[in-house]
Amino acid sequence: MSTDYTYDEEGYLWPFFVFTLAFIITVPLTLLLVRRSRDPAAAFPRIQTSFKHAHTDTVEALRKQEKRKDRKLSLTVAVVVGWAVMGYMLYLIQTTEAPSQKLWNPYDILGISESATEKQIKSTYRKLSLKLHPDKVKLDPSKNETMEDLNARFVEITKAYQALTDEEVRNNYIQYGNPDGKQGFSINIALPKAIVSDGNGKYVVLVYSALFGVLLPYLVGSWWYGTLRRSKEGVLMESANRLFREYRDNIDEGGVVTALSTGKEYEELFKGDKADSGLSKVESRILAEGELTPLAGGISLKDKGKLEDLESGPQRKALALLWAYLGRVELDDPELNKAKFAVAPVAHALNKSFNAIALAYMNTNPLLASYYASQLLIQAMPPKSSPLLQLPYFTPAVVKAVEGDSRIHTSVQDFMDRPDAKRRSLVVGKGLLTEEQYREAVAVAKQLPYLRVAKAYFKVTGERFIIPSSLVTLVVKGRFVPPGSEKVPEINPADLEDIDPAEDDLDAILGRKTKKVVGKDEKTGKPIVEAAEAELVAAPLAAAPYFARDHSPRWHVFLTDSKQGRVAVPPFTFAQFDRPIFEADGRTPTFAMQTLKAQFQAPPQAGHYTFVMHVVCDSYVGFDTKMEVTLIVEEASKAAEMEVEDEISEPDEGKFHFYHRPSPLEEEEGVGIGIKRSADLNSFLRHRLDRGHHARRQGRAAEAEETGQGRVLGRGEQHRRRRGRRYQRHKHGYGTGKLD
């Protein structure tokens, strides 16, 4: 038995192979291209506004350019070629006739029926052998016959005759389907025979060498070294190293902006002559006199010195353009204005890396400076500027009309809390806002997601006390109350509670389910909760008309030690919430109570720990919360003691009513008290035991006073002894009752 390897001479099998290979490669690439082509921001709600500034078209063009960058041309070409190849292979599969494999049948070869007798078989074979014997048959030129064809035909009828008459040959035919016995395997290779024919082998070797020796190592190496070039935050490693060198413990927002200009990404943005082109014009504009700040770019004198100390090059131009962007300085040059808006998203990406560096040092000031710098970059505002600049159409002149000469800036919340007539009188007028612009600004302000924290506390799931080194959950309860909201409902106390899930509800414990308060128990007063599938809701995209990217706001919750200026618990980031923020119209707030949770390990020692909790939004200025929270950690032994006492003090509710009438002696001594309560038999007996002990104690005290022997126990000692006796009775099953 042998195995024969044959190539696809008929050209029927190899289209299946090529189609399968193209399908495996093309479909994943198609999904990748579709995912990159799909705008992720389309699934997020947006703040409804018609505001457009003078450079809105430039900002929109930069946003579309960034989205197109994700759709690489090479990827698109590969997908188109892949689908074209698959289409052509399907055409070949449909049009190429499949070779038919006819089973060897001796009856068909001899031309007789399967019911023929042995005599008929011999007679037919004798006739065919005389007719088809090679010595007696002449070649037919019209059929292109050869002697090999005639011999093969005669051998075929001879085998058919033997299969039907010879015992051994017949057994081979019955067992193996062939008169010659067991045959070898024939394996068809789904490749055209032409690729291995004489003279083509060298080309096949060349193609294989190019694919597996050149292209595959190149792709793997490019991917590997590409990942090594960038940090986890997506910036170049060289940029991360430069930011690390710029880190200072006392850095402020201006210092962070200067540090962000060191990114290597700007060298790609300002190649060659672009680094110096227009630099002097940008610097002259940002260093001119400003309306609200000494300099138009909002740059401080310290940061001005840092700018002037830099040598001309990509960093200096990037820093100058960043200050022009933050100060909303008009450069009167299309290319410079485009570059001004292009540097901000790069700086924002670099700021993520600086934030990670600040977090590694665990110092509060640089971490907050990084978050505040993010707010400024998204809102295009210089450091220490008024939060009112976040509103549409609000210029420095409008801000000055609201704040006057006050050194304390007015927040958006404070401005919107004023009566409408007061607001209108301040900002509507000649050189300020029109009525239409004022209404648009107010409408946008009423859509900004300001998270107002209602309560923050610590807990351990399933426990009543926090012990050292336990897993503590910081629970932050708050509502999104946009500035200027009217008819804000009162907080339901039940919404401030965090109900522990059942021990067997793994989905709820792992956060795959949320708890919804549906009512209140009339007897116990406890809230009734139901588990529901977790459906997280994202906040609207940031209202950032000057930022050339769509950005989803994030809230960072972390704890700091104000005395040491250190971060005690690293930030937990929240971009989605368990309750809707706005109604279906996108404008009406729901005022639903949101729950933010952060888990960390409790300190190893018992005590009272006071932290400062920060809730910082990375997209809006003045929307942050800062409050003190105290973590009480109990000793493990003390917590266990308190648990036992609480268990003893909880009376069991029963189904019987007992009424105890005091005896005449008890009434005379003023000891007996008539009670009527719902309790079980154990509680009733417990009460009787207490009354008997009290009467005996009164008697012992009177006897000691008359004889002068012994002493009368003070109330404190009586209380301690009474608690001890009750604990013993509880331990030995004498009854239950509440400790005094």
Image: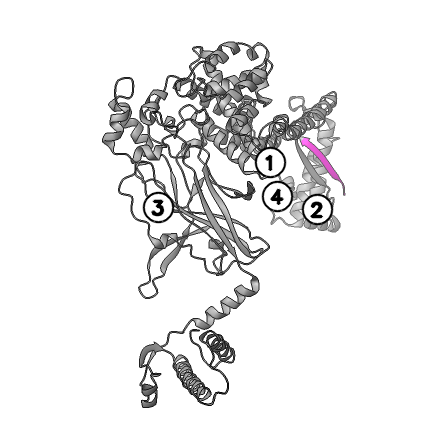
Q: Nearer the viewer, residue 583 or 343?
A: 343
Of the 4 image quadrants, the one containing the C terminus is bottom left
Q: Tag 1: residue type?
A: Ser
Kindly report which numbered mark, 3 or 4, lies closer to the viewer in this rendering. 3
Q: Tag 4: residue type?
A: Ile
State the extent of the magenta-drawn residues as a range: 1-7
Residue 112 is tagged as 4
Q: Indicate which disc, 4 or 2, sits on the residue closer to the N terminus.
A: 4
Disc 1 crowd, CA 10 A, few/some/many (<14, 14-19, 20+): few
Q: Tag 3: residue type?
A: Ala
> Is label 3 in contact with label 1 (beta carbons under 8 Å)?
no
Q: Indicate which disc, 2 or 3, sits on the residue closer to the N terminus.
A: 2
Q: Is residue 218 left or right of residue 487?
A: right
Q: Indicate which disc, 3 or 4, sits on the residue closer to the N terminus.
A: 4
Residue under pointer 2: 163
Q: Is residue 571 left or right of residue 41?
A: right
Q: Is residue 721 visible?
A: yes
Q: Quadrant of residue 216?
A: top right
3D distance between C-alphas at marks 3 and 1: 72 Å
